[in-house]
Amino acid sequence: MTICNLPTHPVSRHKPTQLVADQDALMRIFIRPESDAARLTLLKYMEQILFGLHEFLTRHVGVTQEISLKELAERFNSTTISKHPEKKLADVIIDLIEDIAPHAVNVASPYFVGHMTSALPFFMVHLKTIVTALNQNVIKLETSKVVSVIEKQVLAKIHRLIYRENEAFYQEHVQNPQTSLGCFIEDGTLANITALWVARNSLLGARDCFEGIEKEGLPAAYRAHGIERLVVLVSRLGHYSLKKAGGVLGIGNRNVIAVEVDAQNRMDLNCLRQKIAELQDSGEKTRILAVVGIAGTTETGSVDPLGQLAAICAEHRIHFHVDAAWGGPTLMSEKYRHLLAGIEQADSVTIDGHKQFYMPMTCGMVYFKDPKKLDAIEYHAGYVNRPGSVDLGRKSLSGSREASSLILDSTLKIMGTQGYALLIEHGIEIARQFAAEIQSRPLFEMITPPELNILTYRLVPPAIRSLGRIRFEQGAAEEAIGINDQLNTITRKVQQLQREAGKSFVSRTTLRVHQYPGQDIVVFRCVIMNPMTTLDVLREILDEQEAIYGQIVNETVDL
Amino acid sequence: MTICNLPTHPVSRHKPTQLVADQDALMRIFIRPESDAARLTLLKYMEQILFGLHEFLTRHVGVTQEISLKELAERFNSTTISKHPEKKLADVIIDLIEDIAPHAVNVASPYFVGHMTSALPFFMVHLKTIVTALNQNVIKLETSKVVSVIEKQVLAKIHRLIYRENEAFYQEHVQNPQTSLGCFIEDGTLANITALWVARNSLLGARDCFEGIEKEGLPAAYRAHGIERLVVLVSRLGHYSLKKAGGVLGIGNRNVIAVEVDAQNRMDLNCLRQKIAELQDSGEKTRILAVVGIAGTTETGSVDPLGQLAAICAEHRIHFHVDAAWGGPTLMSEKYRHLLAGIEQADSVTIDGHKQFYMPMTCGMVYFKDPKKLDAIEYHAGYVNRPGSVDLGRKSLSGSREASSLILDSTLKIMGTQGYALLIEHGIEIARQFAAEIQSRPLFEMITPPELNILTYRLVPPAIRSLGRIRFEQGAAEEAIGINDQLNTITRKVQQLQREAGKSFVSRTTLRVHQYPGQDIVVFRCVIMNPMTTLDVLREILDEQEAIYGQIVNETVDL
């Protein structure tokens, strides 16, 4: 393995020669080359990565280079692992920068406003590098030590941001090995699954001869608790991970029941109350496992009425989970934290670090109001996670884990709540300005105005719009549906052409909204989190959509 | 936020001044500072990280500095997030290197042989940095593009390493959006859960009016399929994640049944056959969900007789899962891949990238022989993961994911199978030499000799050993138990003192072994994967244990 015959010019491509892996080469890659020249080379590689990649991303404003999936699939279809080393490190790095990066997606572009991914603060790369170099495994103290301690501390910091308990509470729990304020896990999906797993086990605990659901399983638990069905109630804008949780946990994903939303796309409280009453009055022995409130729905950024949901859950003694994977960090802004009022009454809360904490992929988290709640999923093993230990892996869905907490902890120190508040406020305020811009243009129709920093709209030629409105209002529903189908085709087509052009990226989804009851409406979906995404950038994106539409009209007689 | 008033000397500590987060500062942290000076500074930080951290780790041979958990807990107990930035990036980096790293665990030390974590090839840090800078989310094509294509390719490469299907098979599936050869997930625990989730859904699929377990839930599935109990059979040395899987998936973790092992700590085939017959003959309507074979048990590194297990599973039409989280990469070695013979008949296989692929934390993977198997857990959503799309998030337990596949793909190119074979062979061969060394020392008793690169032993003063043997062989079981209890105390104490001394780290677990039926034996557990861990290093570790024991004997009259 000659990868550590470090070249003096790491930027140059090497001629193909037979590379060999031998014991000496192996030792060299595991230790730092001691010579200054080798050291310089390793640093040069890092410079290439930091700036080569960054320059590409800056130069390449668009979100992706034009190359079809088919072409890519044909290029990446060899499936054998070479016996001898195929490439030197230097060449692998060059390939990644010059060949792979241009076909990746430039999620850092201000014109990439389609998903919950954006540019990161530059120092995130440094922090992740530190985490990698230390390579701690937070499953247990013996492979993480101080990092487990820091993880408990940062869990307490975010718990406090959400729940605002008093100082005595946090002093009791921050470093208490017997209690857990939350846990880190790969992402929001697994955080939601963890929350419902905990709720399931708490609800179906041991009683009489029954030793608890986790041990005896769901059918035995239903018998012991006299239940025939367990359900989860969530607004129909809930993330699909909640259905997945229903499936994985064995309650069945059809028992994750969608509750209708109001005109603001928030869970309709009357519908919820009615649903609860129905379930309780039905002949079936149904128990409600949890009500899930959403702080920032994936598609529209709406926030459910958390305080009122909490009150209803308290009244009926139902576990109240809040999926704040997206909206959680809004709590950093004094100006907008009121939008999440009531979250402090949740039994559990999901927040993602890789969304509005601007951390690199990935960092899911779930918090629990009651520091004993995670006991419901505790596991031990002989060699690790012994009872009473400080091992964080005792109460977690996953096992081995990266020290993401170290990144979040450092970032909180570097940014302060003020730094995050600026980002959050930028997103919310630009989204509002963008909404006004959309409304001012005759070619567009606002579908869901922004509550946080997500909005949806669609393309509606003015002639069709007035036609649609009138016909619909006169009760000619079928005709309205026909018109909306036509509009769906237009929006779908424009979104696709804009994506393929590669200059900017707005995502697309299909919604049911109060304006058009019972109809599927295809919309552009905009997520504004990149601080470089200014109103001017967004205007350009609308201009481009107008231009694409103009082209379609010219080319097609149908529309 | 003054973090980007980049200091000219990043190594110097800054005097505390009021740091402020404002819009200008915010913009600066999201874009690369354009001046050469700023660029140089960012690189300086990286140099500090790469070499400062590395030099600390090299200088500091031991595995952890002496500081009690209590002291650490007292230092990390503030739970408020400062409003203003607390620290500049430069200071955060210095803190991490000078203050945090010394209290982390030096898992890269050749003297750290206690867990499945070791030194990494140096370039892993570079590769992870690239992944972070690109920040792709592999949940969907729209946030990853070529990376999704590369992920499918590398999944095919590892699938081929395991299953060795023919070229036509791989050409059909490598880039086929309709099929999946496996998936990446946070770690081995979640990979095992995924495998059993898939097995559960496949077994309890739709029939007649029943729409399948995932939709209708476990109690309905049991009724529809006429089942009263679902069980998983695994050797009693199976990883605790399998019990966790039983709990999470709703079948109940007591239904994950431990099968006795033979004298080589491999699943006893007669016991398995007997257990299957018992379950089938019992009045209960029991179905066997899966038999799990282990390729490298966590505690002893044993490999179950995979080929014979596969035959038994085929005979009874049971899903055969292999947990090769640890042992999987042994397949890279032509010399030792026969140890895993039969793995190619498994229905599913777990392998961890952060174990013997030497990747940074964390990278779990699960592979399926049948490329349609993952369909059993498919989910869609309106805004993403649309049916028929190339989005990899459609068939996965998690949602957002880091592009770990890019690291594995690059590493396979840099190392070749030859490079990995050297590492694997080093571990196995040094473990054998170490076993011989242990056996040659009168103070130690080998408990489980290495099959791969894990072994366990314990401290047994010669006088006690002969005494124990004789008494035990004469049937004086109670006395033998008393003696083993005493030996357990000794081994436990020596392990603890050695860990606390911080020079080296051997882990500890409690085993039941054929030599001492029915007794809990406390052992030292050694995992040899660091290529810098030579026999000399291991001898030093034994010397230290002998010395610690000598001290105990001098201080205590009891032993």
Image (tube, coloured by chain):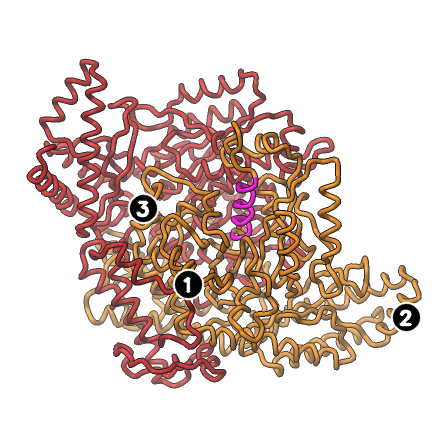
Chain colours: A orange, B red
Residue bearing the label numbered 2: A470
Q: Counting residues from the N terminus, which is met first, the one under dot 2 or under dot 1?
A: 1
Q: Left or right? Give the position of A539 relative to A127.
A: right
Residue A505 appears at what percent x and percent y?
62, 70
Amino acid found under the numbered disc labelled 3: Met
| Horizontal and vertical percent position of residue A454 | 64, 69
Q: In the image, is residue A193 part of the stretch drawn in magenta?
A: yes
Which residue is at the front of the view, B305 or B272? B272
Q: Mark 3 points at which residue?
A: B116
Q: Which amino acid does label 2 sit on?
A: Ile
Q: In this view, does B45 lie above or below B444?
A: below
Viewer-nearest residue: B260 or B34: B260
Q: Which chain carries label 1?
A: A
Position of the N terminus of chain A, as image quadrant, is bottom left
Most frequent secondary structure within the magenta stretch? helix
- The residue tagged 1 is A167
